[in-house]
């Protein structure tokens, strides 16, 4: 007997987000400006700041790193699968630290005991209807209660 609460699977295939790119760029530029106003040798601090900007742009905004998330699958049974840019597919579980907001979703996923993935989804990274369905299902089912996977 099937339950009337069985949800159809959701496929999340985010596209590039101008909002996320602007946020990453502005926050790093403000941090660089604040660093330049301090009395210490600021060129030494700007190097890791620039490295952080390059990393965030490559992994989360452009999704060019091999470990960047290409596609997420939320199966009907509540399990999650991550497809990475390098082609590997990993079974994951949704963490309770997932953030569900009106203009931003941050999906935090765990693979195994130590490996973590985070996928920020601003409003312009998905179709509005897909984003609404995802937010609704996350609020109803709750983060961290994904299928047979117990929380870590």
Image (cartoon, rainbow, N blue to C red):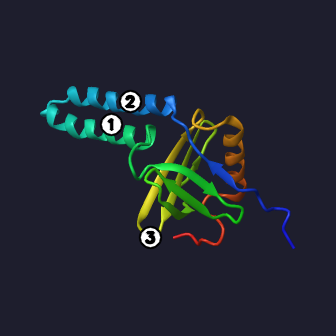
Q: Is residue 29 left or right of residue 148?
A: left
The kind of secondary structure element at disc 3 is loop
Q: Residue at x 27, y 26 (%)?
A: 33
Q: In this rendering, does residue 96 appear at all?
A: no
Q: Position of residue 138 (x, y in %)?
A: 67, 53
Q: Which residue is mark 2?
A: 25
Are discs 2 and 1 less than 8 Å apart at CB?
yes
Q: Are marks 3 and 2 in contact (CB under 8 Å)?
A: no
Mark 1 sits on what residue?
A: 53
**Residue that appears at 66% across and 68% down:** 147
Position of residue 109 in the picture relative to residue 79 (left or right): left
Mark number displayed over residue 44? none
- Vertical position of residue 149 compared to residue 72: above or below: below
**How far is the residue under mark 2 from the one under mark 1?**
7 Å
Q: Choose top left, top right, bottom left or bottom right for residue 62.
A: top left
Q: Work out whether mark 3 precedes mark 1 in sequence or the reverse, and give the earlier one.
A: 1
Residue for badge 3: 113
In the structure shown, which secondary structural element does the residue marked by tag 2 occupy?
helix
């Amino acid at each position: 007997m099937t339950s009337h609460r069985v949800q159809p699977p959701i496929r999340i295939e985010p596209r590039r987000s101008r909002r996320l790119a602007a946020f990453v760029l502005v926050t790093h530029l403000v941090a660089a400006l604040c660093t330049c106003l301090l009395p210490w040798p600021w060129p030494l601090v700007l190097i890791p700041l620039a490295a952080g900007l390059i990393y965030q742009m490559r992994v989360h905004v452009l999704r060019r790193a091999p470990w960047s998330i290409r596609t997420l699958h939320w199966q009907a049974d509540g399990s999650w699968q991550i497809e990475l840019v390098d082609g590997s597919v990993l079974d994951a579980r949704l963490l309770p630290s997932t953030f569900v907001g009106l203009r931003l979703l941050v999906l935090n996923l765990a693979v195994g005991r130590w490996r973590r993935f985070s996928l920020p989804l601003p409003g312009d990274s998905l179709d509005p209807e897909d984003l609404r369905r995802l937010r609704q299902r996350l609020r109803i089912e709750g983060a961290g209660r994904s299928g047979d996977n117990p929380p870590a």
